[in-house]
Amino acid sequence: MKAISRAAIIAVGSELLTPSRTDTNSLFITEQLNLLGIEVAFKNIVGDDRAELENAVRGAIARVDLLVCCGGLGPTDDDLTRPVVADVLKRPLVEDEEITARIRARFQGRGLEMPEINRRQAMVPVGARVLENANGTAPGLWIEEVERVVLLLPGPPRELKPMMTAVADGPLLERAAGQPLVRRVIRITGRSESHTEEAVQPLYAEWSRAAIPISVTILASLGQIELHLSACCTSRAAAEAALDDAVERVKAVMGMHVYSTDGRALEEVVGAILTDRKLTIGVAESCTGGLITSRLTDVPGSSRYVERGLVAYSNNSKVELLGVPEATLAAHGAVSEPVASAMAEGVRSRSKVDVGIGVTGIAGPDGGTPEKPVGTVAIAAVSPSGSRVRTFRFVGGREMVKFQASQAALDMVRRMLLEP
């Protein structure tokens, strides 16, 4: 059997050619293949058109060792991946009765009778290996040819991801020809892209000359910078060790601006700190409208530390729910550091929590003044060890301002709890 070094991905589905859907499956598949040292030569998105899909499949298998098709394995007439691939490979489709029985049992477990059209999902090209789908009815298929492999995966991510991971750990691992590619993602906040690049750039030359070279990509996104480090080596352990050292070098340069080196989002990092220290938190939000609380509670197990979140949008609600003095509002305005501090103190004392956050600002597009333009946000945090407050000037539209404010608020809590 030929070793696999180059792959192509075809995402199948007319919905992926519309503005409302994004092909995220290809990104996950690419990551899994790269980890095995398999290069993704190209990706295609093809609608539910038999002729177009057949042309794409024929073109791909002529150029690569591995073709991964995702989607189009359902039971309806527009699910064409299985029959098209069978035709191109000249492998007749036959019903696998074990698959039919599993699908029928899945429906019966929900108190339903299996529709006859689901039998289509049990049609398997002769000689294909069936990949069990624990999260849906459409099995995957591994089809080996002398010169190539064709892998068919279901479209829903919750079904595709565990199946792709199992294949990457099994038959693909055995056939991969390249050197494993190992990656690290370092997430940084509180610094601009240019400041980050300036601080880290002296390390680039050193890494490029190392026994195991490390390549770096810097990416800027809302409220954070990401450094993507990658290394290739025949020994995965050696690549891992080289990247571990590189991560430590970046942390030494960037200090507290680095908040994650293991892929965790900021809300997960803050949640872990609160959990480790057995602290609880309450959030009082105005311009962010509950976004900070939503991010905190997106983390499984957050009920251990999130006590409550209050959206105090109007001045009256700030007074009634949080005890913000009317005199403070009158003297400084709703968007001010004294009001943000009063909101944080109010939610902390009234919720009887350890940490309180207060956020008030102007998200736009209107409401700004020359003194307080759109994007002005005051953020405060209080804890048993002290308090912090700061006024930020964020750029962008309403959603961008809200997200950046939530990021800054969570980072303020992180720094307050970690810094001396």
Image: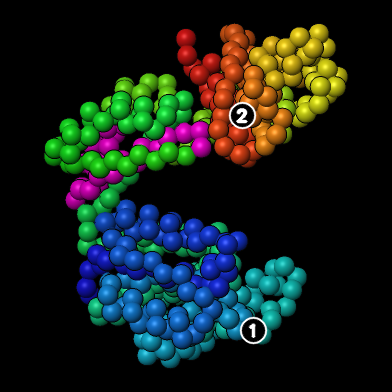
According to the image, label 1 marks what residue? Answer: 117
Left or right placement of residue 328 versus residue 399 in this view: right
Q: Quadrant of the N terminus?
A: bottom left
Residue at the (19%, 50%) spot, across then down: 234
Secondary structure of residue under mark 1: helix
Label 2 sits on a secondary structure element that is loop
Pinpoint residue 10: horizontal percent, then vertical percent. Answer: 42, 70
Q: Is 276 displayed left or right of 259 in the figure?
A: right
Q: For label 2, count other residues whose C-alpha is less than 10 Å away and answer few (under 14), some (14-19) or many (20+).
A: many
Q: Which residue is mark 2?
A: 375
Residue 42's tag is none
Instruction: Establish if 385 lies above or below 208.
Output: above
* Residue range corresponding to the magenta coloring: 222-247
The type of residue carrying mark 2 is Gly
Q: CA distance from mark 2 to mark 1?
A: 54 Å
Q: Position of residue 331 (x, y in %)?
A: 76, 9
